[in-house]
Image (cartoon, rainbow, N blue to C red):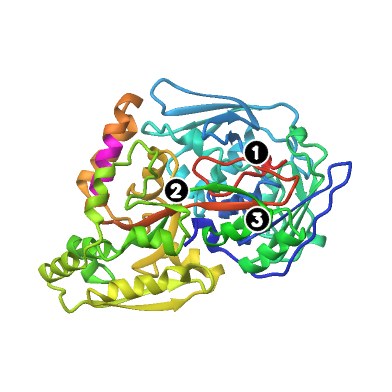
Amino acid sequence: MLAATSMLVAACGGGSSEKDSTGGTLTLGVDVAPRSWDPAQQVSAGTGVVLWQPVYDTLLKYAPDGSIEPNAAESFSYNEDRTALTLKLRDGMTFTDGAAVDAAAAKASLEHMRDSAGPDSVRLAGVQVVALDDRTVELSTERPNALLAQFLTWAPGILASPASLASPDLATNPVGSGPYTFVSQESTSGTSLVYQRNPNYWNADAYPYDRVVIRVMEDETARLNALRSGQIDAGPVSAANADQAESAGLTLLGNAVNWNGMFIMDRDGKQVPALGDVRVRQAMNKVFDRDAIVKAIYQGHGVVNNQIFNTNSDAYKADLLAASAYDVEAAKKLMNEAGYSGGFDLTIPEIPGRTDMLSPIIKQQLGLIGIDVNIESVPATQYLDKFLKGVYPVIPFGLPSGTPVADVDASLAPNAIWNVFKTQDPKLTQLIADLQVAPEDKQKEIVQSINEFVTDQAWFSVLAFPESFWAFKGGVSAEKMTGNSAPYLYTFK
């Protein structure tokens, strides 16, 4: 089970690593390949961020502790009711095509993201953008939006040359203002990405390497072998292989940030009527022994949880664990009460070699209450697309949990990115509306009420928060990011 952006994968062989006195090369082995260089198609979570961060700068910066700092925008401020966010751009920045990084360019980039059908476009839905002068841009919303600044640290904050946004080559030729440029002639689509230092980047000292090479390596065994042999400097390693990596002398950076389990997306029963009954969804949660899963699947590297909020979140409530306690007989009783004692058929997808860690357990355990699970093998490069298009009513998946407000916005709001079927409930909708205008000292009570609702309604079947690991060879390091399984590029040293 993986973070959201670990779903876009292409296979390849090993890589190489070289260092020299001028900065050398950082070589990463990753499990995700870009679908497109279009800024609107980039993602904000998981390993996918590492792919676009070399070429695209963002308006604001997401710090390792989750705080928001200036970046391409040297300053930012909200108005009193948080319906307007004003940003002042640094002077003298340019895109790699020579165009100025000015307010007009920022406006073009933001509107391109907003008006696209990209995975993060919803974060800018309804946002109006005005260039107040050459270096000042204002974003406004009808209702308070305290998350807008945070969004601008992620994919919605990407800056791209306006000319490139109108180019037919946008998908294959990125033109940004980031610390590196994409070297297309040395790269191989879906296999190897090569980046060269951008000599005109405003904050070059933050990036010590002259070149970055990213090798797409779907097979974790191959990636681990490449780490051991020094062909790559760093890369993600699953919890199941963490002990093996450490025994090989690699340094591990662990982060229990992603919940793993099932999205029960068809909560209204549009595709599978049985899923529209909360008792069925609750029964599906009671057939999993979460302690055993953490021990057997994740080798003990994980935290038992049945909530989409991590255990350090203000939204987390330990007393909610009882709602999903392992009890097959209670699950059968719920199925009988719902009129589905005979069960029903359910098709779920899996990526061979990746999400199939849990697929057999899902099939076996749901089978105990009569749910006949058919597992469809889906190419890794199609997995996220099928998820976002609502092809499957239930899908094995994993998402990072950061701040509770951001988690609500990403997964629970009516127009949330990961609320693919756009499920709504009047009670939840009102709680989310209350959260958007609540002062900080009142937010904890509201997010806990939201958590109580979605856990009781069994919108998800969260099984655990396994640790997500990155392994590093000697001399290379990075920082743990709050709310993201992968370190950001600027933290690599």
Residue 235: mark: 3
Question: Which is nearer the N-term, disc 1 or disc 2?
Answer: 1
Badge 1 local density, few (<14 within 10 Å), some, or many (20+)? many
- Please, is residue 346 above or below residue 93 in the view? below
Residue 254 place in picture, x, y as percent: 55, 48
Magenta residue check for 449: yes
The residue pinned by badge 1 equals 105
Amino acid type of the residue tagged 3 in the rendering: Gly
Amino acid type of the residue tagged 1 in the rendering: Ala
Magenta residue span: 446-453
Residue drawn at the location 36% of the way across and 33% of the way down:
143
Amino acid type of the residue tagged 2 in the rendering: Val
Residue drawn at the location 48% of the way across and 54% of the way down:
301
Residue 262 place in picture, x, y as percent: 37, 62
The residue pinned by badge 2 equals 122
- Please, is residue 336 above or below residue 446 in the view? below
Helix, strand or loop at mark 1: helix
Helix, strand or loop at mark 3: strand
**Marks 3 and 2: which is nearer the front?**
3
